[in-house]
Image (cartoon, rainbow, N blue to C red):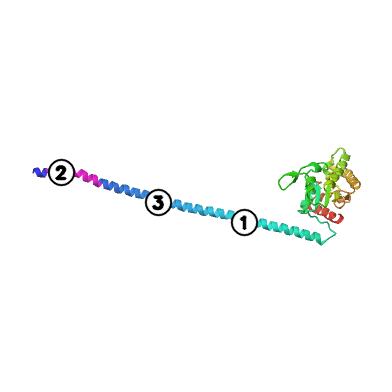
Amino acid sequence: MEKYRKKKRMFSSFVPLILIIIIGGFVGNKILQENSQVDNIEMNNSINNIENLEENNILENKVIENIVNQIENNNTSNQNTSTAETNEIKNESSSNSSNNSEVKFDRTVAFIGDSRTQGFIMYNGLKIIQDYSYIGLMVDTAMTKEFVKTSNGNKITLLQDMANKNIKKVYIMLGVNELGWSYPQVFKAKYKELISEIRKVKPNCQIYVQSIIPMTKSKSDSDKIFNNTNVEKFNQLVQEVAEEEKVTYLDVKSVLVDKNGYLPEEASTDGIHIDKKYCEKWLTYLKNNS
């Protein structure tokens, strides 16, 4: 009996241990399962991250590829443009050389003037001439204004730039911005000085002075400064400059005005600056008279 009790006490002492082992195993399995699920989730997330990275890389590659294509297309476009411009210059040179009696508007020709000359150059596509036009330019500022850009980005006067260029002909049209000057004789003196300065840097070039283009009737009748009475007075001074300085006077206005001496209303939107059609007439006159 005593022996049975000992066995029972021994068994009873083992039961809690056995239960601990069983519960521990169960809990352990549960933890393992949960850890396994976590690992699976983390693995899935890692896989998703990898896939996302791959997708992002694909997108980045596509973006890079698009950029490269754009650059290549731009380069091709620039090359085509450069080729087109080269061909245009060649065609222009060919056209000029085909008619020996026609003026060659190439790099040996310079134009000095204000915004009217700017429009003339732009509308006629004179891309390879020496462009010394500037908005508001006058006979005095033409000698001092630093507006000509050099290859290194600096700005110099047109006279400084001319000194370094092979210029054979110079066309000048100035005077419209000076119509308000109180002393017209100062205009004449400055015009003569400009011609003298040009001769210093280009003693062998041929100089042409062009008449000031009149205004439309509506503009002339409504403006105290920009009117044809002043234009006529200043054009007389330009002719005197040409005669005294022994340069050629070009009566450009003669092919641009109507029978009453006004710029036609349809030729200008502001009564002063002329449109493409009349700029082309201006160019034709220069070709035929210089």
Label 1, secondary structure: give it. Answer: helix
Q: Which residue is mark 2?
A: 10
- Choose the circle earlier in sequence order: 1 or 3: 3
Is residue 269 visible in the rendered image? The answer is: no
Label 2, secondary structure: give it. Answer: helix
Residue ID at (40%, 49%): 42
Q: Give the magenta range.
A: 6-22
Position above or below: 201 against 104: above
Quarter containing the N terminus: top left
- Choose the circle earlier in sequence order: 2 or 3: 2
Quarter containing the C terminus: bottom right
Residue 83, magenta (yes or no): no
Main SS class of the magenta portion in the image: helix
Marks 1/2: CA distance? 90 Å
- Choose the circle earlier in sequence order: 1 or 2: 2
- The amino acid type of the residue labelled 1 equals Glu
- The amino acid type of the residue labelled 2 equals Met
Q: Which residue is mark 3?
A: 43
Which residue is situated farthest in the left direction here?
Answer: 1
Q: Which residue is mark 1?
A: 72
Indicate the position of residue 206 as horizontal and vertical percent values: 85, 51
Indicate the position of residue 165 as horizontal and vertical percent values: 78, 50
Q: Toward the viewer: 184 or 163?
A: 163
